[in-house]
Amino acid sequence: MEETLPGTADDDGPDSIVLHVDMDCFYAACERLREPELEGEPVVVGMGYEPGEGHGAVATASYEAREFGVDSAQPISTALERLPRIDDLGPGDDPAAAGHYRTVDLEFYKSVAADVKAILHDCADVVREVSIDEAYLDVTDRTAWDLAASGDRTLAEGFARYVKQRIAREVGVAASIGVAPNMSTAKIASDFDKPDGLVVVRPGEVRSFLAPISVEEVHGVGPVTARKLGSLGIETAGDLADADAAVLEAEFGSRGRELHERARGYDDRAVTPTGRPKSLSRESAFTDPTDDIKDKREVVRALAADVADRARSRGAMYRTIGIKVVVPPFDINTRATSLSGPVDDPELVESVALDLLDAEFAETTVRKLGVRVSKLSFADADQSSLDGWESAEAGETGGDGDERVSDEPPNTGGEAPSRGGQSSLVEFD
Ligand code: DCP
Ligand code: MG
């Protein structure tokens, strides 16, 4: 009988199947794509590094370079001490003990990431991108924890292998994948057998898989917490799982209970998609509040152009166009017009935004104006995926998916009376 874990209990429906995909030495792998002769060689990619120079920091090192003690975030000068640059070798030096140093080329890496991401979106309906080279996939609906007919492997494992092979074949870079019934276990699993890893933790195995792992690997445990846990004799996730919840709570408050549950394999966070903002908006404040309609129209025109341009570059179509008008001191008014279907039409954004301004705020003294498009849909998956990685990073800090540039606090304004026609109150949250 398989042990039933919290968060994987039958009464929650079937166990989730979460994949955590993390590319191996990603920037170095990208450099190898355009310089295949770097395959199997120690490669160091430096940020702020210039060929022949010794400054900058290591962004990543290939696994061959890591053997020499080169690692992310190290000064290039340290890396060069451990692994000389191949171009600096003298006649008698051993080329096998030297490395290839390259400069970060983020645009290129983003284009490779977009190709990977397109595959991930093809393989899962729910993809949460967390960095340029890392994403969670919820594939519960695409596969199963059941054993494959051919043996003792799960269908989920076969599915993850398929994802890995597609990335390798179609893009040419290696991914490590962790498969588990929840996000934190999947993440630990993807890191467990890098590079080129595929680690599957079945629902009944979560706790035993986590048990020997250092507490530092548990989601939410930083160095300070790890030290404190150490002083309580708690070194591994297993120790943490076995610890008295009351003691942990006394020491760490409600976080203590949470860490205890994580260590026991409990993590009921749903994989929520990122990288696809719900809306795009931009705001601009006047140095001095103004009621000049020409000034207000000019600002709205510029904001509309900017927002429409960003929507287009992300491959986003919108069904709602809105404005925000902040009246001194902090009276926030929002108005929007719904369209009959999704469009990508910069001129319409401008004319609708101007109409909304003219209709009610022609005479109003304003402190700040904003334009927003919302009810987004992404027609061109490839296009939107290119930027998706970036917004995913922002999303990790707890955004709601609305990508905006604003210093405005969340909308605290009261409800505006709903107007006739199709305009209505929307929140520039
Ligand atoms: N990166 C960076 N600076 C860091 C860490 C990472 O610029 N301090 C960049 C370079 C990496 C990429 O982000 O290639 C992805 O980060 P990872 O932590 O996933 O590291 P790698 O993919 O390089 O290696 P691994 O195989 O351990 O995932
Ligand atoms: Mg990586």
Image (tube, rainbow, N blue to C red):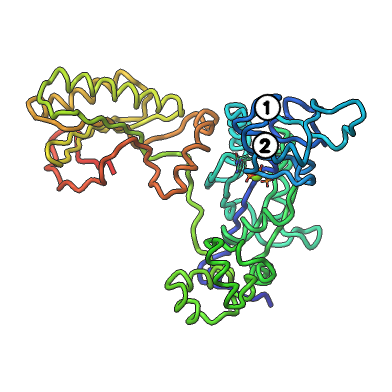
Could you say where residue 319 lies in the image, as x and y percent from the top left? 33, 32
Q: Secondary structure at mark 2?
A: helix
Foreground: 208 or 258?
A: 258
Q: Which residue is mark 2?
A: 76
Vertically, is 25 above or below 237? Answer: above
Could you say where residue 397 lies in the image, as x and y percent from the top left? 44, 48
Q: Quadrant of residue 318?
A: top left
Going by the picture, which residue comes out furthest to the right?
92
| Beta carbon of the mark 2 residue lies under 8 A of ligand 1 | no
Report the number of numbered marks: 2
Q: Secondary structure at mark 1?
A: loop
Q: Residue at x 62, y 31 (%)?
A: 109
- The amino acid type, in three-letter code, at marker 1 is Glu
Quadrant placement of the N terminus: bottom right
Find out whether the residues at labels 1 and 2 contact each other: C-beta distance under 8 Å. Answer: yes
- The amino acid type, in three-letter code, at marker 2 is Ile
Gap in Å between the C-alphas at discs 1 and 2?
A: 9 Å
Q: Earlier in the sequence, mark 1 or mark 2?
A: 1
In the picture provided, is 237 more to the left or to the right than 340?
right
Foreground: 134 or 416?
A: 134
Q: Residue at x 58, y 30 (%)?
A: 106
Going by the picture, which residue comes out furthest to the left?
363
Ligand 1 positioned in quadrant: top right
Label drawn at residue 53? 1
